[in-house]
C-alpha cells in the first residue's frame, strides 16, 4: 500500500483509498467498463467461474462477476484489485506530472 495517500497531482490531492473505493463502487454498480476490467483481472488470475456451481448456457460474465463479488473472497479480491488500480493510476499521475515539469 502507498504510505502517502495524499500527494498533489496537477494541483489536486490524489487519495488512493478514496479512488480505490470509487473503482470498487463502479463494479458494484455494474458499470460495464469497470466490470470488464475486473473480469479480465479475475480471468487472468484463474478465478473467473472456478467457484461457480450453477453454470448454464445463459450465464454471462456479468453474472459471474455479480455473484463473485457477493462472496467474502470476491469482496477481498475486488478491494485488492481496486487498490492496485488506484495505486497504478497514482503512479501514472505522478509520472505525467514530473514529465510535464
Image (cartoon, rainbow, N blue to C red):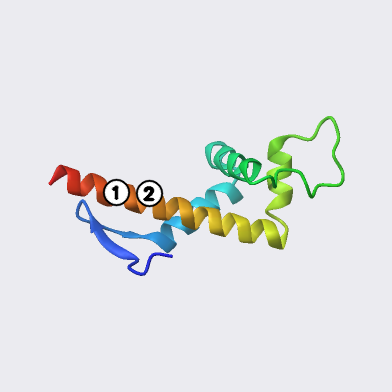
Q: Is residue 64 left or right of residue 1?
A: right
Tell me which residue sits at (58%, 37%) in the image. 36
Tell me which residue sits at (40%, 50%) in the image. 88
Residue reaching furthest to the left: 101
Q: Which of 55 and 27 is in front in this view?
A: 55
Circle 2 residue: 89
Q: Is residue 34 left or right of residue 92?
A: right
Disc 2 to disc 1, C-alpha distance: 6 Å
At which x and y percent is residue 75? 64, 59
In the rendered view, would you say 81 is above or below 56?
below
At which x and y percent is residue 74? 67, 56
Circle 1 residue: 93
Question: Mark 2: which secondary structure?
Answer: helix
Which quarter of the rendered picture does the N terminus lie within? bottom left
CB atoms at circles 2 and 1 under 8 Å apart?
yes
Q: Which of 75 and 47 is in front in this view?
A: 47
Amino acid at each position: 500500500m502507498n504510505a502517502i495517500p495524499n500527494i498533489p497531482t496537477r494541483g489536486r490531492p490524489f487519495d488512493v483509498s478514496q479512488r480505490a473505493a470509487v473503482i470498487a463502487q463502479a463494479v458494484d454498480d455494474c458499470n460495464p467498463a469497470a466490470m470488464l476490467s475486473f473480469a479480465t483481472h479475475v480471468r487472468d488470475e484463474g478465478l473467473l467461474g472456478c467457484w461457480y456451481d450453477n453454470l448454464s448456457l445463459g450465464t454471462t460474465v456479468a453474472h459471474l462477476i455479480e455473484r463473485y463479488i457477493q462472496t467474502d473472497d470476491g469482496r477481498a479480491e475486488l478491494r485488492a484489485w481496486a487498490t492496485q488500480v488506484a495505486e497504478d493510476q497514482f503512479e501514472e499521475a505522478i509520472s505525467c506530472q514530473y514529465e510535464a515539469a
